[in-house]
Every structure is written in structure tokens, then in C-alpha cells.
Amino acid sequence: MANEKIKSNFIYNALFQLSGIIIPLITLPYLTRVLHADGMGKYAFSYSVAYYFYIFIRLGLHNYGNRTIAYVKDDQHELSKTFFEIYAFQFFMGCSMSVIYLMYCIFLSSDKTLSFIFLLVVMAGGIDLTWALYGLEEFKVTSIRDISVKVLTAACIFAFVKDESDVWKYSLIYCNGFFISQVVSIPILKKRISYVKPKYQDIIVHIKPNLILFLPTIAVSVYKTMDKIMLGLMASEQELGYYHSCENIIKVPLALITALGTVMLPRMSNILSHGNDNSEAETIFDKSIAFVMFISSSVCIGIMTVSKEFVPLFFGEGFDKCVTLFNIILPSCLFLAFANVIRTQFLLPRKKDRLFIISLFTGAAVNLILNLILIPGFASVGAAIGTLAAEIVVCVVQAVSVYKEAHIGRNIINSLPFVLAGVLMYAVFSNYSPVILGNDILSLLFKIVICGLFYLAVLGVLWFGKIKIHYQGNNSVKKEKI
């Protein structure tokens, strides 16, 4: 029954994550042609500033709130009590940050129109209860909610965004959708939780661990959000537009990886809270590593392989630099995927928060230093190099920290067939440009198909060889015993 729950939750969360990618993939070619790189850069800069205020409202709730609710969800009274103790501080931070952001809009913003529109994102942080729904493993509800809002948002983009001056319309449509998606979750949660008036001393108890798990959010924001702000300030809105457009494509493979981590964090926390046999958690961990390495190696390296055909067809004219950016940023997904499983299925469920925080701040420091050095001279390419270096450092630090406990060596060996298959696919086909009936779309689809078949064939050979070697090794051990 538990395995079925995990599968259904993963499917629902994967659908949600994919909707957040597929729908932008439908709208992005339209937006890049209508708003161009400058317009996309203006949007990305205003969003990044507002997002910083948003994360200061939610603090570490994505991990702390999710995990804490998962631990107490089987006790109705304790669940309700814990929820309101945690949410009281979130509400306070929501009000405080909204006022401060309003001051920013009035006195500091260079584009007041866009900044005032993004106030909706900041306000949404005070009512974002997704962490509680995830802790309750209510992934079906959140998926249906967000998919519906995203479809409506996409329809509005095509209906109202018509030229480069409509950046404000695009921003307003996005912000309204973001805010509405948080509002509709309130009545859903009311069905599971009863009001319990929180006491001041009980609220205080949750602040410190919440702030501790906010530290990783700050660290991640340095190379997920701050890099865009630095690009806007130190380079140009056009360079930021290239970088932002590439990031939207990279989110495709990350959707399934993130979906798995989001589902498994509360599940692993619940398994460990009941003192279950560690062998169950270990088996799930190993399978998760194999899954994310398959997704990241096939999709990420696959996008790199077809980027020369994909970029001009998808983004339109003037985005050629995205080919270079793809080849720099996409390999980071391999390291991000491996580290994501370590984080959500080993470090956080076992409350090894210190190791998690150290790894992220190390990566953030590397990223910040490289951005300061490289962005002035290399613009978006410099930011891409900083992101790649940060993800490598985070993954290495986390893997080394739990090398023996999590059997990292075994999982690295198990991951090699996926990575090698992807590297060989790129080496063979990256410079191959098929021409099918003079049609660019058919040519791209043909290349995707043959690359995919090649990847699967190589993976099959490598995996079969790995199993054969393992089988022969076991037989030799048995013979020695005899």
C-alpha cells in the first residue's frame, strides 16, 4: 500500500512539475518572438527581486514545514496544533516583507510598474501553504490546482501579450496566476486541519529550526536567483534574457527530479519516524539514484546534442548564444540530480541539516566568486560557468559527507552506464545535422529519435555487461568457497 501511495504521489507531483515546464515550453517560443531578449530580461530581473522577498517570507518551510507535518500527520490534534504554530510566524513574515517590498517599489525600483505588479508574488508568500499539503502527501490536490491555473495563465498570455511593450501584461498575468494558486489551497487545507490557537512559546520553538533550514534557501538563491540580478546589473537585460530563456528549458529534466525529491522527503521522514527497518529506506534510495541519473543523462545530454537545431527553431532569431549556454549549464543537472536524492532521502529525513547547509554555502561561495570575476567579461557565459561549478561542489561535498553511510561508491558505479551512454550519444551526434525534406521540424524530430535509440542501445549494452560481470563475480566467490 505504501509503494502504491509513493507511485501515485510521484505521478501527481510529476504531472504538476511537468505542467510547469510543458506549458512554458508552449508559451516560451511565442514570448521570445514577441518580447525579445530585452523584454524577457526585464521580466526576469523584476521577478528575481520579488522572489527574494518571497523566500524571506517562507524561510525554510519547504523542507522544515514539510518534514515536521509529515512527522505528526497521524495525530489530528498534534497536526492542527503544529500547523498553526508554524504558520503564525509565516503570516507575520508575510506582512513584514510586503511592507518592506512596498518601500522598495516606491523609493528604489528602476521599473516601478513591474515592481508593483510583482507585489502579488510577495503577498502570495504569506498564504503559500504548499509545504503543509506536501507534508500531508496531498499531491493530487496541489497538482490539479496548479495545472488548472497554469493552463488559464497560458491562455491569457496568447490572448493579451501582443508586442514588446506588453512585458507588464505578461508580468500581471503570471503574478495573478501565482497568487490565485495559493488562495485556492486554503479551503483544501481546512478540511484536514482544525483551528488551534497557537501559544507564543510554542511558536518560538519552530523559529530556530525553520531559520536553520532557511540557510540552504539563501545559499541556493545565490546561484538560482542572485545570478540573474547580477547579470541584470553587471551585464545587460539582453544577456539576462538569453540566460533566463535557457533556464526555462533546463527545467524540463529537473521537473521529474524535483517531483521525486518532493514526494520522497515526507515519505522517508515518515518511514524513519516509525523506526522502520533501514533496508527499506536504503532500497528506495538506490532506486531513486538510478532513476534520476537516467532522466538527467538522457534528457540533459539529449538537449545538448540537438541544441544547434533546437535553439533557432524554438527561440527564433537572435538567440544563438543559447547553444553555448546549454552546453555549459546542462551538465550541472547530472550533479544536481545526484545531490537532490542525497538531500531529500538521506540528509533531511535524518535531520542532518548541518551537512546540508555546509554543502550549499560552499557551492554558493564558489558561485558568487566566479560570478563577480566572470560576469563583467563574459556576461551570461560567466554566469553559466558559475552555476555549473556550484552544482559540482554541492554534489561532491554532500557525497563525501555521507560516503559510507549512504553507500555512495556503489551508487556512483551504478550511475556510470547512464552517464557513459549520454556522453557517447553527444560525441557521435552533436555535429550531425540531418535534412529531412527540407523541413526543420522533421529534421529535429528525426535527430531526437535516432539519438534516443542510440542512447537506449548503448545503455542496454552497458547495463547487460554490468549485470554479467556482477554475476560472474558472484559465481567466482561461490567457487572459492567450495
Image (cartoon, rainbow, N blue to C red):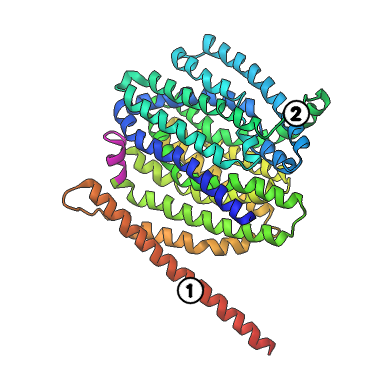
Residue nearer the viewer, 278 or 197 = 197
What secondary structure is marked by label 2?
A: helix
Which amino acid type is shown beneath numbered disc 1?
Gly
Q: Residue at x 57, y 56 (%)?
A: 289
Residue occupying image coordinates x 78% and y 36%: 78
Residue 251 x, y percent position in the rendering: 46, 41
- Residue 96 is left or right of residue 255, and the answer is right
Q: Main secondary structure of the magenta part?
A: helix
Q: Nearer the viewer, mark 2 or mark 1?
A: 2
Hey, which residue is sitting farthest front in the picture?
191
At a point 33% along the width and 18% down the height, the residue shown is 165
- Residue 352 shown left or right of residue 303 in the figure: right
Image coordinates of residue 319 in percent, x first then y, are 31, 35
- Look at 59% across and 61% down and name the residue there: 411
Q: Quadrant of the C terminus?
A: bottom right
Range of the magenta residues?
310-319
Question: Residue 320: image x %, image y %?
Answer: 31, 38
Residue lying at the far right of the rendered structure: 201
In the image, is residue 288 part of the stretch drawn in magenta? no
Report which residue position mark 2 lands on.
85
Farthest residue, direction bottom:
482
**Left or right: where does residue 262 sit relative to residue 116?**
right
Task: Please identify the quarter of the rendering in which residue 329 is found.
Answer: top left
Residue 315 part of the magenta-drawn span: yes
In the rendering, at what x and y percent does residue 293 appear?
A: 51, 56
- State the residue position of label 1: 465
Please tell me which of labels 2 and 1 falls first in the chain: 2
In the rendered image, which quarter is residue 103 located in?
top right
Q: On the rendered structure, is 59 left or right of 203? A: left
